[in-house]
Amino acid sequence: MTSPLDWIREAASARADAGLTRRLVPTKAHDVVDLAGNDYLGLRHHPAVVAGAVAAVETYGTGAGASRLVTGTLDVHEELEAALAALTGAPSALVLSSGYAANLAALTTLADAGTLVVSDEHAHASLIDGCRLSRAAVSVSRHNDLEHVAELLARRDTPRAVVVAESVYSVLGDAAPVEDLVALTAEAGALLVVDEAHALGVVGPGGAGLVAAAGASGAEHVVVTTTLSKSLAAQGGVVLASPDVRDHLVNTARPFIYDTGLAPGSAGAALAALGVLREHPELPARLHANAARLAETCGVAAPDGAVMSVPMPGPHETVEAVERAAALGVRVGAFRPPSTPDGSSRLRITAHADHTDHDLDRACAVLAELVPSQA
Ligand code: PMP
């Protein structure tokens, strides 16, 4: 007798044989040094951020209660949008319930069947899914290869084009040539969608990201997406763009229109985190100093942002290293296919501004044992 789940069990067994099974491991306590998470500025437990979340819940309730176009637009959303626009220099901002939704919203509304999308081969899954849902023709460009982007744009036979990149890449941790991409797309009459999920709060003036660093926040053809869930220690996403693009999203983006408004607690936390970042402009520099020390221990170059990627021989060795580190009180991330575009396996290590010297001593002692070049 066959079961309709047979094929799922067979796929699970093949995954296990290849060392590619994903498991949920609860993070329980503060007795680990977290080199895997994305709370880059260490603000998730910051008293002001916690207070911001609590105050918003007390004022607006635990949920937004409706989609933004019904009764789910709250003052805290508008304050947060104003604060995000102020930090980045963007003309306007629209918050959504996640960074994933922000990328789906941007791409499904800025690209259509008459658009060529040129997307970097290392673009995040949410950007890829946005491209797929948009029904645009998609050409994948070699990683950070401007000439390839230009070549693909020049070959287009569609009336519109959109170039998609991350400003700091989520797995490799390297930065895109944002200034050049801004110029290239302007010249080609294309839009540029830049995901700053790993850049906001980390790089650029006051943590404003690399589009701001390139002086392009106000450029009409540049649309920035980002998340509130990493350095802003909350949950949610945002699209930063011209008021015309914002209005277009409000009217046509299904992940915005048909989704309940961002939970007030998340909006309040992100707003408070922006306040902490404003009052403590030294936080990104502290993060970079910590990143440089971790990178040296791992034998890799100091990263552009907070993320370091350490090549490993294969998926089995990667999982083993992650488990050994966890047993020694250090959490590191594992990236294996299909999460890596080039089929490689890597440890993903993230620096955080709130790691103490003691945390780093402990982390570096463990990393020195795990990383192949150090063995
Ligand atoms: N873009 C990038 C580059 C990301 O790394 C992530 C999160 N992993 C997202 C978008 C999605 O953001 P969120 O977690 O807020 O949905």
Image (tube, helix red, strand yellow):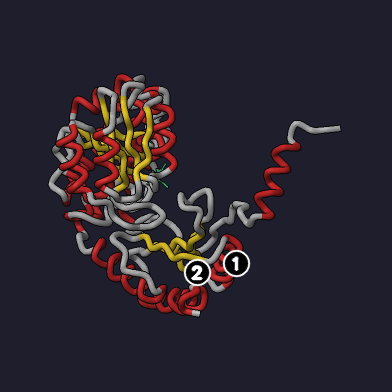
- Quadrant where the N terminus lies? top right
For label 1, count other residues whose C-alpha is less than 10 Å away and answer few (under 14), some (14-19) or many (20+): few
Q: Which three-letter amino acid code belongs to the residue tagged 1?
A: Glu
Q: Is residue 280 above or below residue 258?
A: below
Q: Position of residue 343 (x, y in %)?
A: 50, 53
- Compared to residue 268, the image places residue 261 above or below, namely above
Residue 364: quarter of image: bottom left
Task: Please name the residue shown 58% across and 66% down the image.
Answer: 317
Left or right of 199 on screen, residue 327: right
Crowd tier of the residue under label 2, counting other residues whose Cα lies within 10 Å: few below 14, some 14–19, many 20 or above: many
Question: Left or right of 343: which side holds 114?
Answer: left
Disc marking residue 320 = 1
> Does label 2 point to a residue whose CB lies under 8 Å from ligand 1?
no
Up-down relation of residue 232 to residue 282 (above or below): above
Q: Nearer the viewer, residue 138 or 32?
A: 138
Mark on residue 330? 2
Q: Which marked residue is nearer to the observer: mark 2 or mark 1?
A: 1
User: Residue 226's x, y, as percent?
Assistant: 32, 43
Asked which secondary structure carries label 1, the reply is helix
- Label 1 CB-ligand 1 distance < 8 A: no
Q: Residue at x 53, y 52 (%)?
A: 337
Amino acid type, callout 2: Val
Q: Residue at x 26, y 40 (%)?
A: 151
Q: Quadrant of residue 251?
A: top left
- Single out the residue that lies furthest toward the right: 1
Q: Position of residue 150 (x, y in %)?
A: 24, 40
Q: Secondary structure at mark 2?
A: strand
Q: Nearer the viewer, residue 319 or 331?
A: 319
| Mark 2 vs 1: CB contact within 8 A | no
